[in-house]
Amino acid sequence: MESELFVNERELVIPGQTLAKGLDYLPSSGCFRDNNEVKAKLLGLVRLKDRFVSIVPLAGVYIPKPGDGVIGFVKDMQTSLWVIDINSPYDSIMLLGQAVDEYIDLNKTDISMFYDIGDVIYAKVLSVSKSKSVHLTMNDYRARKLIGGRIMKITPSKVPRLIGREGSMIEMIKDKTKTQIIVGQNGIVWLKGEKEALAVKAVLTIENESHTVGLTDRISELLEKESE
Amino acid sequence: MTKAGAPEKLIIDGKRIDGRGFEEFRPIEIKVANLKNAGGSASFKFGNTFAQAAIFGPQEMHPRHLLDPQKAYIKCRYTMAPFSTKERIRPGRSRRGTEISKVSKEALASVIFLEDYPKTLINIYIEILQADATTRCAGLNAASLALVDAGIPIKNLITSCSVGKIDGQIVLDVDGLEDNYGDVDMAIGMIGNENKYVLLQMDGIITREDLSKMLELAKTGCSKIFELEKNALTEKYKTGELNEEKHE
């Protein structure tokens, strides 16, 4: 049986569109196989890698993966764990042992002295079980409590675009606005610094125009113009 | 539109009362992502029928006892705004609304990959802001586009349209007058271009031959809507020139 590919790299496709025919192409994320055809199940841009056809979605919620760096809000606290809201349908928990290095005597210590309800943290996803219970850890060199600054939300699937290839886009914004920026894989962005408002504007522009070409240049222009 | 009572004829000189041909839609207008705070949204107009759909989720499942560890749970709510018809409608649930919510939910559930988001809830709201017959079809079309906008994985778009029989003639896209004074009104929902039915509701009396003619007409109608839905989506997310810039 002959196989055939119907789409190009970075082409916009809609759900149900046939991307490839034949068994030589395999459906990866955002695609499914319908008999002999590989079809899209999301609206997004096509990505091809070897025999795999996948789709980078333009919308959607965050589904945690082990190893992701996420920004979360401490929502609840129990004797030895925290419940963290990570902007996902699944709540995550962080056990005491994953958050604090030293020995804690739980009879004498109230764990709110480490993280309290309402705190914002940058943490790493330790594991996601099959039943979708998510564990976080602070055992990472980037993990910390975020104090001050401001928080904004973008579409999680657009995070790679905001970061850019090897961090080019985010580094440019940090550099030109002299702002500290931390981007969680879950679409939450934390900003703190001199020109926060300008950085926010740049991030929102990326969010709205993420699917268009020549974005880096436009952002660079915007930053040049506004920072004068 | 004339307000006083039943019109004498619904077909005059081979045209319908509003001047359409038998196999012609009212003007269709589609807007995607028109609500800012919803996860996904779309509106769909058949002439004076105006449906707005919004999707929230996948989100945490409440009430907890309905949670399904294998797949997502769908809640679908179809409501008509109090001002949507000539006479005020009591807002909130109604017998009719509950029924349409159920059939819409089942039609949409047939295309959603529910197993991709276990233990979650997908909320679908369909609000009819102006009603002139064919509301459930407009609502279903809007909801299907809103699902795409929300980034929920689906097999294919859902297309839906109504067919009817007025003065012995089979017509596409029934409007308010034709619905009230015509013989048959049938709502049909199909999966994109796949020739599969997900919704079929009818009232009136009809022969077997007429039914198959109506299904055939609905199929051509749905394929037209499918093209319009596709265009609306690709228009919304124009990428500029393709393949100029490679990025992660």
Image (spheres, coloured by chain):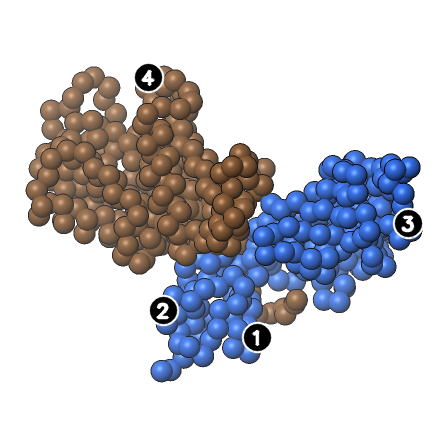
Q: In this view, does B55 lie above or below B157?
A: above
The mark found on residue A49 in the picture is: 1
Please report the residue visible at 57 percent of the width from the left and 55 percent of the height from the top: A58
Left or right, B2 with reference to B211: right
The mark found on residue A103 in the picture is: 3
Q: In whole angstroms, how far apart are the C-alphas of marks 1 and 4? A: 58 Å
Q: Which hue belongs to chain B?
A: brown
Q: In which quadrant is the N terminus of chain B drawn?
A: top left
The mark found on residue B87 in the picture is: 4
Q: In whole angstroms, how far apart are the C-alphas of marks 4 and 3? A: 70 Å
Q: Do labels 1 and 2 share a chain?
A: yes
Left or right, B104 with reference to A146: left
Earlier sequence position, callout 1 versus callout 2: 2
Q: In whole angstroms, how far apart are the C-alphas of marks 3 and 1? A: 47 Å
| Residue for badge 2 | A35
Please report the residue visible at 64 percent of the width from the left and 50 percent of the height from the top: A133
For numbered disc 2, what is the local secondary structure? loop
Q: How crowded is mark 3: few (under 14 residues within 10 Å), some or many (20 or more)?
A: few
Circles 4 and 3: CB distance less than 8 Å?
Answer: no
Q: Which hue belongs to chain A?
A: blue
Res. B167 in view: yes
For numbered disc 1, what is the local secondary structure? strand
Q: Residues within 10 Å of mark 2 (few under 14, many from 20)?
A: few
Q: Do labels 4 and 2 share a chain?
A: no
Q: Are marks 4 and 3 on the same chain?
A: no
Q: How crowded is mark 4: few (under 14 residues within 10 Å), some or many (20 or more)?
A: few
